[in-house]
Image (cartoon, grey):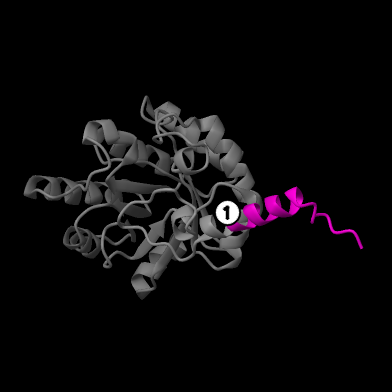
Amino acid sequence: MNTTQQLIQYKRDGTPIVVLTAADYPTAQLLDAAGVDVILVGDSLGMVTLGYETTLPLTLTEMMHHAKAVRRGVKQALMVFDLPFLSYQASLEQAVLASGQALKEAGAQAVKLEGGYPRLIETVARLVQVGIPVMGHLGLTPQSIHQLGGFRKQGKSPEEKDTLMSQAIALQDAGAFALILEHIPAELAHRITQSLEIPTIGIGAGPHCDGQVLVTSDVLGLSAWQPPFAKSYADLRGVITQAVQAFSEDVRQRQFPHVP
């Protein structure tokens, strides 16, 4: 089974890390059997699975429900739990309790938090201190879209670049075992990756990160919309539509079920 320490070793060895998202048992089982290194129960499920317009309405209770299903399908991959909005920002105690619940009740092996502001760095350090592995997340942080002005690329100005670099180092120093870099310039992601001893996982951050993550529905072609940095490796949306239409036609023409 993959561990947080194994991911750090992958970086040292130059072995690219594969990360995908899951929100249910069958998807988790398929990803795990296919050899994915990390399965992230991402708060993106609020949009792609539950139909919210953003990740913000998603609750810890909803995340726990999906994470428990994912856990039952995972045998080898490292399972990371994405803490939803307002489940860790209010206080250190709140963050510890929510993270502990993710590990104790949902079987996660690590949690992910967004941001790199000083209070968040303190939270990461506290979680690590009590034995909870933490993955950081910098760049485009979807829980802050109203502050960021939408799903816009980050780290474009020299000031933003310096801030993200400082935050990445601070997260590492606080004890984070890995860092997601989302929708930032490739050259900045490259510099951050070279500066850290922990692995970076890119999503819309160019080819130089230590690994890559995408939302699984984008990879499978299930999404009605996907970001410009995503790539579809199948068209399951089309396949499912054709299958349902064929079934519907058979039922309406009384061709199903078949009578010998």
Q: Secondary structure at mark 1?
A: helix
Residue 246 part of the magenta-drawn span: yes
Q: Give residue 98's position: percent from left, percent from top.
A: 49, 33
Residue indicated by mark 1:
241
Main SS of residues in magenta? helix
The stretch in magenta equals 241-260
Q: Quadrant of residue 120?
A: top left
Extreme residue in the right direction:
260
Q: Nearer the viewer, residue 113 or 146?
A: 146
Quadrant of the drawing holding the C terminus = bottom right
Extreme residue in the front direction:
253
Q: Nearer the viewer, residue 2 or 188?
A: 188
Q: Is residue 15 above or below residue 80?
A: below
78 left or right of 164 in image: right
Q: Residue at x 26, y 58 (%)?
A: 205
Q: Give residue 130's position: percent from left, percent from top.
A: 45, 40
Q: Give residue 74's position: percent from left, percent from top.
A: 61, 56
Q: Give residue 107's position: percent from left, percent from top.
A: 59, 46
27 left or right of 89 in image: right
Answer few, some or many: residues within 10 Å of disc 1's Cα (few below 14, many 20 plus, some between 14 and 19).
few
Q: Residue at x 29, y 53 (%)?
A: 181
Amino acid beneath label 1: Thr
Q: Is residue 10 visible?
A: yes
Q: Nearer the viewer, residue 215 or 160?
A: 215
Residue 116 part of the magenta-drawn span: no
